[in-house]
Every structure is written in C-alpha cells, then in structure tokens.
Image (tube, rainbow, N blue to C red):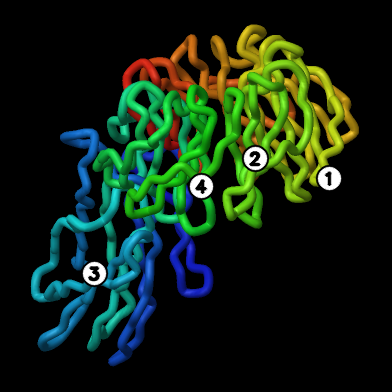
Amino acid sequence: MDFINCYWNNNVLLIKKKNMKALKSQINLKVTNNTSFNQNVDILGVIPNSNSANDSNALYNFNMSSVTYTGISSISITYYLISNPTPITTSVSLTTQNIQGVVTALNTLGIGIFNFSGTTIYVSSSIYVYSNIAIAGSSILGTTGIDPSGIVLDSFGNVYTCNQGSDDVSKITPSGVSTILASTGGVDCKGITIDTSNNLYVCNAVTGNVSKITPLGVATIFASTGGVPSAITIDSLGNLYVSDSGTNNVVKITPLGVPTTLGATGNTPNAITIDSSGNIYTANSVSNNVSKITPLGVSTILGTTGSNPKGITIDSSGNVYTANYNSNNVSKITSLGVSTTLGTTGTNPIAITIDSSGNVYTANDGSNNVSKITPLGVSTIVNTTGANPVAITINALGNIYTANQGSDDVSLIVQ
C-alpha cells in the first residue's frame, strides 16, 4: 500500500501523489467531546483494472481502531459522480472496528466525494480510507468503430471518436462502456469537434460535408464544404472551421449551417486549430508550414515546420506547435513567426495536444506510444498505446486519450 500526502484546505482534503499503485488517505477528524463532525475528502483519478480493463468498483476500508464512541453511532458515506450530481448515501455502523465495502457506482473517471459524518465521537481520532484509485499507466478504455481518426471529450468525461472505416461515431463512458452513438451520414470522416452543448461535428472527406450529432445520437448533414475536408475546429460562438486539403483553404460554417470560404492556406492543410482571438491556424503537410487566417479572412504564412506536419495545437501565449510526421519532432512557432524545433518524438507523430502547464504530447503512429515535451524541450516517452494512435486529447487531470486506428480502440494513459 502506497502512502500519499494529503492536507486540509477549506474543509477539503487535498490528495497529491504521482504514480501510485493504490491510495491510502488519513482523515484527522480533530473532534472534541460530544461534537458532531462532517468532513469531505475529494478523490480524483481512475479505478484500477485489477480484474478487468473496466473494473468500475472502488474498495473502501475504514479502520476504526482509534475511534472512541458510545451508544449507537454511525458514519454516513455520501458520494457522487461528476456525470451525475445526485448524491448516493450509505451508512456504516461504528460498532465494528473495521468496515469494508464496495462503491459500485463510482465511475472509472470522475470525482468521488466521500462525506464522513457522525455523532457522539468523544476523542480526536483518525479514519483511514483505503481505495484502489488512481493507478498510473496505460490501459485500453474501450473499443471503437473501424479506423478511428479523431477524438474529443465532453463535459462529463465521455470520449467520442469519429471512425472513418465505418462512418460512425463511438461513445465511450468514463467506466469504459462503448457504444455507437450514430452513423455520420457522410463518407470517410476525418475529424471531430464538440460544442458547449455537447453536440458533435464531423467532417467527411469523400462527401465533402459536415455531420452534426446531438447528445441523443440524432445525426444530420449540417453543411456542405466541397473539396476534401481534412480537419475541423470550433470557436466560442459556435462557428465551425474546416481545413480543405483538396482546395487549400479554410471553410467557415455559421451556427445556422451557412458555409463560406474564410481564406487560403499552404499546400494540403491536414490539421487545424484556433486561438482565443479567433485566428485560425493550419498545418500544411506538403508545404511544411503553418498558415494563419484572421477572423476577417487575411491569410499569411506564420512560419515553417519540420517535414510533413500532421497535427497542430496552440498555447495560451499564442505559440503554435506542430507534430511533424516525417522528421519525428515538434516545431514551435511564436506569435511573431519565429520557428524552432522544440523537441523530438517517437516515430511518426501524427497528432498533438497541450496541457495547462505548456507540456505538449504527440501520438506516435509508427511507435505506438505518446511523447511528452516540456516547455524547455525535454522529450520523454510517456507510455504505450494501442496500435497506430492517430488522434490525441487530454483532460484537466492530465489523463491522455488516444484513438488507435490499428486496433480500433481508445487508450487511456494516467500520468
């Protein structure tokens, strides 16, 4: 059993430990005579795959050996899920010194809030909570349709992939339950994005259009793009932007589904991103550069990249990063257009994402792993993935997800 560091802050027990095999937190109640108590502990992370890849149970063990009590008393355990805020409560008696149970409803990915409350505790005491939560490593979260090519997360922690081989969208819940949400209605879906209402948008390369899929799985053709749409992103107002590798431009689609050509790009834009001011950036695979298009449609070449940039992302300072498939590295281009090589990657990096600390991560199609490059350019391999990861995203906890085209599944990497 590994120990973790924990401390109270505003009545919430904060837990910090990396690479833990298990979790043991000590809650010091610090109660006095005849004083009731009510404390919370936040447990963030994932449940380990002790018996299967998608074990959805969390074990708790309360060691009451140092608790003094009189009469009938109990501890009320309340927990809820990030995807379902309705509290679930159970009570355990203090008449036994060791209490065990299983929280079956705790999601594999989510926030479990355990609330401890009771009465007639006469001495300061400690309750130990053993929970096999937050194992660092790589696992297969769930399966997808055929040849997943893009990946996004919704506000509840569900994962979605667009599957270009089966022309549909897969949904994988935080506990690893996989379903086909809907067919796209288009052919050869290449990219996927999501709006604030959790509607999904998929660009279809062969049919030259964009599909919209509601959270309930209702799919429609939202707009026509023409050409060969290769990637898609969205702004804060719900406007969509699609890079077109056939016509070398970017199409803007309004929330009402009206498409217009926003501006031209370099040769063969295969990835797209947007900054907080609404400027669009594309990674141009054949011309080895990045295009910038302002909201007014003014197009410029921002800077050069390594060989065959396939993925693109941007940080909060306006620095652009590309994953360069042929040169196995990441380019950094400042907002002023200064281009440098940030660091090396695994083999054939094809997609890229960034965390809140400015670390960039690439999905390496040729080596079946994920690279991490710090802002100072230090490169490491984070962990392995399924076969041929071609898309990547990261959540607020730093957990990484890849869509694996060779094995038709999604990898989850917990750092």
Answer yes or no: is residue 339 visible: yes
Nearer the observer: mark 1 or 4; the answer is 1
Earlier-in-chain disc, 4 versus 2: 4
Q: Nearer the viewer, residue 277 or 23?
A: 277
SS label for mark 3:
loop
Q: CA distance from mark 1 to mark 4?
A: 23 Å
Q: Amino acid at mark 1?
A: Leu
Contact between marks 1 and 4 (CB within 8 A): the answer is: no
Earlier-in-chain disc, 4 versus 3: 3
Contact between marks 4 and 3 (CB within 8 A): the answer is: no
Earlier-in-chain disc, 3 versus 2: 3
Residue at figure coordinates x 80%, y 36% from the top left: 293
Residue 264 location, x and y as percent? 78, 28
The image quarter containing residue 114 is: bottom left
**Which disc number belongs to residue 241?**
2
Q: Nearer the viewer, residue 42 or 108?
A: 108
Q: Amino acid at mark 4?
A: Ile
* Residue ID for mark 4: 194
Left or right, 387 with respect to 228, comes to left
* Residue ID for mark 3: 66
Residue at figure coordinates x 51%, y 47% from the top left: 194
Nearer the observer: mark 1 or 3; the answer is 1
SS label for mark 4:
strand
Nearer the observer: mark 3 or 2; the answer is 2
Earlier-in-chain disc, 1 versus 4: 4
Count of numbered labels shown in the rendering: 4
Residue 240 position (above or below residue 19): below
* Residue ID for mark 1: 296
**Which disc number belongs to residue 278?**
none
Residue 359 location, x and y as percent? 64, 34
